Image (cartoon, rainbow, N blue to C red):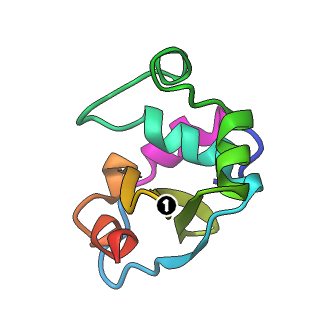
Amino acid sequence: MRGQSPGYLPLLLARPPVRNPLEITYREMTEADIEAALVVRTSTVENPITRERLAEQYDVTPETWAANLKGPQKGWVAICREDVIGFSVADKEEGEVKALAVIPAFEGHNAGRTLLK
């Protein structure tokens, strides 16, 4: 998700899922990916959460996420058609996966499994 505007989400979700071979690439998350990752996280069906609840209950905002990426956390994004379709974030010091999410239309294509590796 080109990272800047969350207004594209309905368009992305309306696209029919691509069938095999699904071309998904993976790379380290950058600060420019945070907005897109937040859209992915708030679009999940299982364990849904709003941006407001992320901020209130977990102190997850674009600013805190950016600071954590410069510190103890590292993230990865899954890209399809130039859009972020999934992400994972892990804490290097705690050895813990903090978050993993994939847009529902792209579930079942091993993006989540690959992001865990």
Q: Amino acid at mark 1?
A: Glu
Q: Residue at x 65, y 48 (%)?
A: 68
Residue 91, percent from left and from top: 48, 57
58 or 83, nearer to the observer: 58
Q: Residue at x 52, y 36 (%)?
A: 10
60, above or below 8, in the image: above
Q: Residue at x 66, y 33 (%)?
A: 7
**Within the image, what quadrant is residue 65 found in?**
top right
Examine the rendering and report whether any part of residue 2 can be seen: no
Q: Which residues are magenta?
A: 6-16
Q: Residue at x 36, y 57 (%)?
A: 96
78 lies left or right of 109: right
Q: Secondary structure of the magenta portion, mostly? A: helix
Quadrant where the C terminus sits is bottom left
Residue for badge 1: 93
Residue 50, percent from left and from top: 46, 21
Residue 77, percent from left and from top: 54, 65
**Within the image, what quadrant is residue 14 found in?**
top left
